[in-house]
Amino acid sequence: MIFHRVKSEGTAHNSYLVGSGNEAVVIDPRRDCRVYMDLAKQNGMKITMIFETHRNEDYVIGSVELQHLTGAEIFHGEGLDWRYGTIVKDGTPFSFGDYWITAISTPGHTDESMSYVLLDSPTTGAAMMVFTGDALFVNDTGRIDFYGPDEAQRLAGNLYDSIHKRILPLGDQVILCPGHGAGSVCGSNISDRDESTIGIEKIRNPWLQIQDRDEFTRLKVAEKPEYPPYFRIMEKYNLEGPPLLGDLPFPAPLSPEEFKEKMDAGAVVVDTGLPTVFGGAHVKGAYSVILESLSVYGGWVVPYDRPILLVPEKVDDVEEAVRYLVRSGYDRIEGYLHGGTEGWYNHGYPVEKLPLVSVHELKRKLDSGEDIFVLDVRDENEWRSGHIEGSENIYFGHLEAYLDAVPRNRPVALICSVGHRAGLAGSILLRAGFENATNVLGGYSAWVTAGFPIEITKG
Amino acid sequence: MIFHRVKSEGTAHNSYLVGSGNEAVVIDPRRDCRVYMDLAKQNGMKITMIFETHRNEDYVIGSVELQHLTGAEIFHGEGLDWRYGTIVKDGTPFSFGDYWITAISTPGHTDESMSYVLLDSPTTGAAMMVFTGDALFVNDTGRIDFYGPDEAQRLAGNLYDSIHKRILPLGDQVILCPGHGAGSVCGSNISDRDESTIGIEKIRNPWLQIQDRDEFTRLKVAEKPEYPPYFRIMEKYNLEGPPLLGDLPFPAPLSPEEFKEKMDAGAVVVDTGLPTVFGGAHVKGAYSVILESLSVYGGWVVPYDRPILLVPEKVDDVEEAVRYLVRSGYDRIEGYLHGGTEGWYNHGYPVEKLPLVSVHELKRKLDSGEDIFVLDVRDENEWRSGHIEGSENIYFGHLEAYLDAVPRNRPVALICSVGHRAGLAGSILLRAGFENATNVLGGYSAWVTAGFPIEITKG
Amino acid sequence: MIFHRVKSEGTAHNSYLVGSGNEAVVIDPRRDCRVYMDLAKQNGMKITMIFETHRNEDYVIGSVELQHLTGAEIFHGEGLDWRYGTIVKDGTPFSFGDYWITAISTPGHTDESMSYVLLDSPTTGAAMMVFTGDALFVNDTGRIDFYGPDEAQRLAGNLYDSIHKRILPLGDQVILCPGHGAGSVCGSNISDRDESTIGIEKIRNPWLQIQDRDEFTRLKVAEKPEYPPYFRIMEKYNLEGPPLLGDLPFPAPLSPEEFKEKMDAGAVVVDTGLPTVFGGAHVKGAYSVILESLSVYGGWVVPYDRPILLVPEKVDDVEEAVRYLVRSGYDRIEGYLHGGTEGWYNHGYPVEKLPLVSVHELKRKLDSGEDIFVLDVRDENEWRSGHIEGSENIYFGHLEAYLDAVPRNRPVALICSVGHRAGLAGSILLRAGFENATNVLGGYSAWVTAGFPIEITKG
Amino acid sequence: MIFHRVKSEGTAHNSYLVGSGNEAVVIDPRRDCRVYMDLAKQNGMKITMIFETHRNEDYVIGSVELQHLTGAEIFHGEGLDWRYGTIVKDGTPFSFGDYWITAISTPGHTDESMSYVLLDSPTTGAAMMVFTGDALFVNDTGRIDFYGPDEAQRLAGNLYDSIHKRILPLGDQVILCPGHGAGSVCGSNISDRDESTIGIEKIRNPWLQIQDRDEFTRLKVAEKPEYPPYFRIMEKYNLEGPPLLGDLPFPAPLSPEEFKEKMDAGAVVVDTGLPTVFGGAHVKGAYSVILESLSVYGGWVVPYDRPILLVPEKVDDVEEAVRYLVRSGYDRIEGYLHGGTEGWYNHGYPVEKLPLVSVHELKRKLDSGEDIFVLDVRDENEWRSGHIEGSENIYFGHLEAYLDAVPRNRPVALICSVGHRAGLAGSILLRAGFENATNVLGGYSAWVTAGFPIEITKG
């Protein structure tokens, strides 16, 4: 038997390929799906089945793409008006090589959510692995807010039941294979350790320490994760089957002149460099979204109906940027700036800066009474759990809608956890004509490390 | 400026990518053309133009495929009813980055043949490189037999003129970039050295030592290269634009049962192992075509209208086999034998052997008067220049049509240069029910090395 | 946390790298140990500790080599006169990044055997992983025969206790990380599935179904695994610290003349091709050891005090062959045959064959009364559990010592499980001047698949 | 025949591997020389000879290292007290495979300089390639300033003779293989095209347009290239044979605490990020040397007797940085900052900035009468050929020695060609306590592109 966990950075999405004999199955493939083909090839296998744990909402599923390449059959749970694939019922076993996959219904995150159990026999209870999608993560559990507040209570209860009545009873020995790892927007406390078992979770996962269904439900409902606008598009794609991608697009290298021309014609510009790079100098008008965050933060600001232009730090970053973007359904990537920002300003085209300020400088200025508007762009949960006294909170994803709440005549110090979202927020302000924004280097975590005072909002 | 020679084994085809600034051009791309994209990407370039030296006949041109991926424009010479691309006239210059390509008409190999000259200016005579397609090779010149015997004289004369009036006058300093390297069916004496210049050729190329047009013509016409049946298909493809390939097909690993089923349904089986492997044991009914020869020897026996099954020595060989096959227009590769010949006979399915005999054994047997039918399957030119006394000559590519000329009641010793074509010939005989064939290990070259007597046929 | 299982083909040895923060630890590194460096580099980590589960006997441990490269500290169990590293006591915890490794003493396979438990705290019982070395495998348990028959009983009892009192009590949730995978000479029934947990083993491992210490001991003692001569050398190396390897040696490509010269001067020749390749034609005098078996079968016949020459099927095989050999302590690899067997016979040098016979042919011949000496070269356990009626059994590893038991005047049909060991046995007979040996294609497994009668020896 | 040009970024050093049969030779190998081994391996060859064109001064030669790995013999010219290798005389031929290398004496750059001619025969004049070291480049010629002003005249004359009497007579057809490509400190006008021939040079190389020996000499002597201090060390290394490198060192990832500790103990810190990155925020006290310039600019400021610490932009940059450093003989690379500058300031350690100013801003400020000290840190030749009016010129490499010439009470705008050397100069000023330095983005080239006025110094 072969087993591969395929991790997709950015979305922190985990997919899996399991093979035996000359057959392999894939659970929750990503859209740039050649990786599964390559694994199958190297092992002399063909991919025969694709299992979806649910209609994913934070990335474009690659099932249809992979089916197109391999002819494999697609399976998913019931309750949605799927336009592709086959619905699988609770308890259905599927065989490949010497192993079996049995589907179990685990609603909660969504109603149609399925988990898939790996066994070495169709009938025994000796489960070996379980692919839980967004039901149970390492150290965390799935979100239950996707159907809106009215349904949250019901979903949270369902999730409790799915975990306690379907997943945990599989046994402590079962290896846990969830749909996301650390960094996902689908779970804020997922561990950076990928290896776990049901038994380890029972000991270590904070949610599994709650033995009361009502308490579990209450706490799940109290979670208020952000809901990015691109989720709706992912849901549509994943219900209907997204457009076929074929080859990974490769945006053309554009000379500064060509780049400028496309900008002027309405393309949106995304600079994928770190805040320090972006802060020093960047193409005027660009959004600042670091490479690793393109799939996640990018979806808050990058429109789906305009061509995208990239400003990479290095040519090598372009392919990775493209992967992140197509995983979020952005297919119109028209080019990248040949020679980067350096080529741009060498041509005398306009650059802007987003000055950086250290927490020490910020503290000094605040102490000396400078009238700084400290804008914390983390989400509400983060903000409540600790922030600089006197700071305001607008989530970076909502900033374009709340520009009026930001003063134009005062210096604005943008702060997030380390500086990435603050950089994006800064680029939003620059695009809106703000002239006094700075990015707090190291963000709230450097503030805390420096031992400066914080304020906690009880809620 | 960047310059890359992309060599395709099997067809011994050379293609080229040249880039400057953010633009690159490709000369005579192959069909599995991602390699050019990757080179362009790594160098921050986009491919803007594709130049074809002529309607190639020994491989499927990748221009249409590459255009599909990149949007580049395709150019080729006039005189054919091309269904794609743009016709370029003698003398037309094309600019990219800091360089220029100028087309010059160099008929001879075919009427529409163009060469392309690389310069650093549109007007100067300071040529730097020339892409000659099948006009001038390192150490050899192009074939002139494609229009039939009636036209050979005319084409040979044209070739002489193209070389002497168009190519050589570019200057000794010009770097030569021909369409083929050693091992091509388009030139039997091409050097295994890729680096050359016009000046080096003037000193070393035997054809350029002939200063008399009539003598050159006479000798070219006297060449009698074999004309494989697949050439006609390549020509059709390359005139009309071949079917789009998209992803390189990856044949499925088939269990012996699945493989057997497809064989029984009419698929043709190709074993890509070396003669020693094939000789030891192979799937009964398979053709023996070693990996490197799939594009070239394969085209003589593998039909275009039946699915193909592969028996690779190793899983890693499958991708290479597929590349060779699609370069020759074989797109219906349905699977390969999982576990190889070993898996096959472990399942108890029928194998056959093609016993190997060393030249020493063969000599001993012939000396002792054994009634062996020594069948030399090299081409007529090779045979005439030296062979075992008493041997018969049937080119392996014609063997299926001349089976009646081979005795069924005598031992048959198959010989070629080293054993590859003899292996293929042996597989043809086995398929036809011959029971006494052997492959002479090391072939004619081992015979000569051993110092055994040979016979030369004057022509 | 990062976790990597590094599998070494041939020895089927598993080693592990676990990292957290900027520190990584390695368990049981192999000798060609750059792989751990590369993993550490890619993850921005330094290797600080190396843990040995025991003095391995089937491969050269890479601890000293890796220490030389990284400066990491080496730890192993007590009871041996180690010439390197530091002895670790039962219960000692080691911290790296956010995790801990705690050593537990698990004698049985050997007296100094340790297991290492991964935890996220120095004090809790929440074990996450356990590195068991040769105590507990997926589906099997370690050998207890290394101290000789007098000690076997005691060791088996210790092993039972180590498993039941130290390893299983860690909990069903613990992920199992043993020292070997399928194909190891250290356990004949190890699963080809690498993923397991203590809980899965409790359900599926046949040895854990035995709840009686005496019964377990009796059955362990009854196992009679073969003991290859190279084990003694590995033990010495691993006690004293093997010679530093530095760069992986790369044997020179030798022309047939150079190769011949070194052969004549006493070098031993190893052909790494498959039996079908070797059978067709091979360098006279070569041993037949397929690539994947070099570490394991090679150790029975290849001497440590003579230079080694390789005959690879492909140039690419050379590096892999070298890895296998150095893992078994063979450092004197002087060259390989450039051009392979084909180059050899093209030069007219002497080749030999080892004819192949299918099980169908063999059956026919036996049925027709041919006086064939069927020699089964599998080990005694395999032979007892089923063999061709009338066959004799000499383990291939003992064949050179028992040549007198093989008749020189009768055809000898060599058989093993699929043909690899029979090929090696055949090469031994050819070297000893036998002229009538054949290799049974597909071996005993093809015989069984064909439905031919077998005989079982009760023991 | 195989031919590979191995380009080493940074030093813009070209080395070459040429092979035929099973033998290969290397010309001017670099110190991290596994690349040649790998090429030889892939082609089934062994490296038998190493040719040095001269005692290189701008990088550490890899001959001794490669000899250690392969046993190949080393050859170089006469006139130096070499501590390794064998002296080769003018006209000596060496054979490998089907080809020959003949040495010809081509003094000028240095007295012992040799060129090596590739031929297919020991006696003919049909030269195919020539390896010219630092005698003749594509578009340029070698430096003649290494023996000091007193010898320059003599060397320049020798160089003229070597080119005109030894190299050019080889023939227009000869492919030129020089020791450096574009970007080398050994020739400021080397073309970015690597492919050339003697004939192309005769048409295009400006130095070959000068037919008068005296005029050539006069112009060569008038060239005043900078002479970095590390050249002396390279010369010593390359005369005596540098220390063996063995494995490429891999510096440990250091936590901010560990990094700080080593800094405090005297290690020198090098930030390899782009000026925009460095400008935004960097470890206080670091030198700014971008990755690609480590070998070249680094040698002006980085001491040989102190440990080196790196601040890379990405972990992947570390290996490349190490290659650049060891090529210049820096072997004491003790670690790199884990988590980069971001990790550093997240820990609250002190950062500094080097503000960036665009040419437009600078122009505006100068026009408005701001008292800015514009310091141009390019070399004298660059400065003379055009600079901002009123700017001062101190080569960045001399800046540490001339700090007194820079005012501490005025804003300093540092300018070079694009910003890399100005960034390094800025880091020098910051280390020296200057507080008002800025880096002019895009440098002189952006200034010119913007159409701002310049001043040319005749002389």
Image (tube, coloured by chain):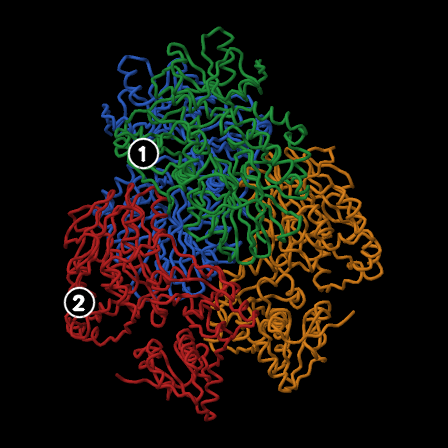
Chain colours: A green, B red, C orange, D blue
On the rendered image, what quadrant is the C terminus of chain A found in?
A: top right
Q: Is residue D170 visible?
A: no
> Which of the 4 image quarters holds residue A206?
top right
The quadrant where residue A215 appears:
top right
The answer to which image quadrant residue A353 occupies is top left
In this image, B53 relative to D353: left or right? Answer: left
> Could you tell whether B316 is left or right of B13 in the image?
right
Q: Nearer the viewer, residue C349 or D458?
A: C349
Compared to residue B346, the image places residue C6 above or below, namely above
Q: Does mark 2 fall on the same chain as mark 1? A: no
- Eyeballing the image, is C316 above or below D55? below
Q: Helix, strand or loop at disc 2?
A: helix
Q: Nearer the viewer, residue A67 or C235?
A: A67
Residue corresponding to mark 2: B160
Q: In the image, which is nearer the foreground, mark 1 or mark 2?
A: 1
Instruction: From the top left corner, tell me how far across and down residue A17 is, in percent.
Output: 53, 48
Q: How many numbered markers are drawn?
A: 2
Q: Residue at x 63, y 30 (%)?
A: A207
Residue reaching furthest to the bottom: B369
Q: Inspect the image, locate mark 1, and give the three-letter code of the amino acid beneath it.
A: Pro
Crowding near the residue tagged with mark 2, few <14, some 14–19, many ≥20 C-alpha atoms within 10 Å: many
Residues at marks 1 and 2 touching, judged by CB atoms closer than 8 Å: no
Badge number at residue A307: 1
**Above-or-below relation of D187 to D428:** below
Mark 1 neighbour density, 10 Å: few (under 14) some (14–19) many (20 or more): many
Q: Is residue C131 left or right of residue A44?
A: right
Image x and y of residue D299, in percent: 45, 35
